[in-house]
Amino acid sequence: QVQLVQSGGGLVQAGDSLRLSCVVSGRTLSIYHMGWFRQAPGKEREFVAAINWRGFSIDYADSVKGRFTITRDNAKITVYLQMNSLKPEDTAVYYCALVSKGGPIYLRSTLGYDYWGQGTQVTVSS
């Protein structure tokens, strides 16, 4: 069984920073990509950022580019999302996700991800 355990999040004011972490545990598997998504109340889950596990490919949603940074620690099998200059519109439940199969994939879609974290709430007050 594979588990993605998230930590971080909370309630902050606009302009503050937060860091989310996502640790992968369980049976041995191949990791090709990891990503972060978020879902605000009444909205669909949307792409935030993704990172290739073995290379240096990184992608960000336009709404977070320049403010959020995704990084990984291969040894710890952990992916991070550093969120700076937070805005009220960043308020959402954030999810990490993992792609365990190779081949072409559209990382901005939820469909390509095989495993998901439990979600963590981020609330940004104005």
Image: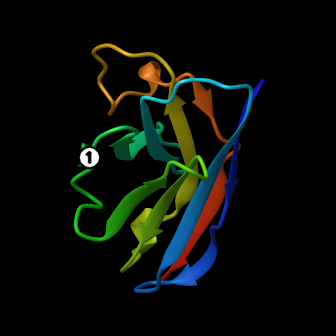
Looking at the picture, does residue 23 appear above or below residue 85?
Answer: above
- Picture quadrant where residue 28 is located: top right
The residue shown at (36%, 38%) is: 54
Q: Position of residue 101 (x, y in %)?
A: 46, 16
Closest to the observer: 81 or 92? 81
Q: Position of residue 76 (x, y in %)?
A: 61, 53
The residue shown at (41%, 76%) is: 86
The residue shown at (52%, 32%) is: 98
Task: Give the left or right position of residue 11, taking residue 107 as reference.
Answer: right
Looking at the picture, does residue 65 appear above or below residue 87?
Answer: above
Q: Position of residue 94 (x, y in %)?
A: 56, 52
The residue shown at (23%, 68%) is: 66
Inspect the image, locate mark 1, and give the three-letter code of the amino acid beneath it. Answer: Phe
Quarter in which the N terminus is drawn: top right
From the image, tell me which residue sits under label 1.
Answer: 56
Q: Is residue 3 visible?
A: yes
Element assignment for label 1: loop
Closest to the observer: 118 or 22? 22
Packing grade of label 1 (10 A; few <14, some 14-19, many >=20) is few
Task: Give the left or right position of residue 49, taking residue 59 as reference.
Answer: right
Closest to the observer: 12 or 74? 74
Looking at the picture, does residue 81 appear above or below residue 125?
Answer: above
Q: Position of residue 42 (x, y in %)?
A: 53, 43
Task: Give the left or right position of residue 56, taking residue 5 as reference.
Answer: left
